[in-house]
Amino acid sequence: MAYGTITFFSNVLGYDASVDYLLPDTRRRARKWTDWEDKKIPVIWVLHGNGDSSNAWIRKSTIELYARQHDVAVIMPSCQRECYTDSKRGFDFFTFVSDELMTVMRNYFPLSHLREDNFIIGNSMGGYGALKCALTYPEKYAAVASLSGAMDFREALKGNDMIFSKSAPLIFGSLEEYEGSGNDLYALLEQLPEKPHGDELKVYQCCGTEDFLYPINKVFRDVLSRSVKNYEYHEDHGGHDWFFWNPELPRIFDFFGFKEVNEWNDSGLARSERR
């Protein structure tokens, strides 16, 4: 894989934004670059959790192994602690991730514009952000995966959350402003059937049973299972950490529609193709 960091001026954020990326190369396939002329690459948009940045998934996860196996690009923006929201204090991270970032990256790299080639995943705060993007714009993504997502910020807005109670009002406003808005995942789920491709969106959710976010994930699971027909949920022993999240990645890639076929090459891994 080609790995790097790109920094560009964001009109939405008003400053130079940093984005890490992984792009497929030709080594595993014994191909020449000319074989990929005009090829548009499938892409997974990856959102980090609270306290991390754009390189978190590079440093802590195994995503590069699966991206390499499946010839898929991975785009990882850095979005501070604003919950992927157009916040009350003026940081429009939702617009940045769901709109501007896609446009910019497609101008720099040969990424596919097709809905069926675009996926989004995130862990913790990023799991919330990934779901918000996909539920708001199901026409942009074929599937979404939330790993131990922070599904609901009501308790933070009531002052009952150790992590976000101080910042939540500065991001979402009041509890009344949050409920039923575009930041409320439950409201977005209710609106999903009315949106283009809303009935086609695939949703994967997982959480460790010892995770402090397990209770709100169980509640959201029950609603999701009734609202989305192409839905998969997985739980197991584990906490809010990469020891739980890393083993979920092969399940997520399979759910997204990637599979292995028995064709071997220099890496010793099976070549893969999209279903």
Image (tube, grey):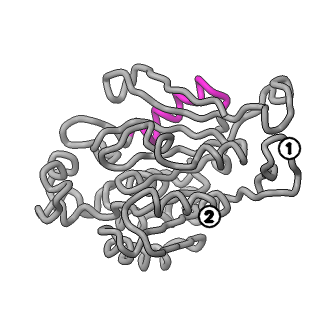
Q: Residue at x 67, y 29 (%)?
A: 110
Q: Amino acid at mark 1?
A: Asn
Q: Earlier in the sequence, mark 2 or mark 1?
A: 2
Side of 222 relative to 272 (left or right): left
Q: Position of residue 212 (x, y in %)?
A: 29, 68
Q: Which mark is residue 161?
A: none
> Quick one: 213 or 196, which is closer to the camera?
213
Secondary structure state at the residue bearing disc 1: loop
Side of 47 relative to 170 (left or right): right
Q: Amino acid at mark 2?
A: Arg
> Quick one: 15 or 185, which is closer to the camera?
15
Quadrant of the frame with the C terminus = bottom right
Q: Residues within 10 Å of mark 1 (few under 14, many from 20)?
A: few
Secondary structure state at the residue bearing disc 2: helix
The magenta region covers 95-110
Q: Residue at x 39, y 26 (%)?
A: 17
Q: Is residue 101 magenta?
A: yes
Q: Residue at x 66, y 34 (%)?
A: 1
Side of 20 relative to 175 (left or right): right
Residue at mark 1: 265
Q: Position of residue 186 (x, y in %)?
A: 36, 67
Image depth: mark 2 or mark 1 in front: 1
Q: Which mark is residue 251?
A: 2
Q: Is residue 217 above or below residue 222?
A: above
> Quick one: 205 or 154, which is closer to the camera?
205
Q: Position of residue 56 (x, y in %)?
A: 43, 42
Q: Position of residue 244 (x, y in %)?
A: 47, 63
Q: Is residue 73 magenta?
A: no
CA gap, disc 2 to disc 1? 23 Å
Q: Is residue 269 above or below residue 208?
A: above
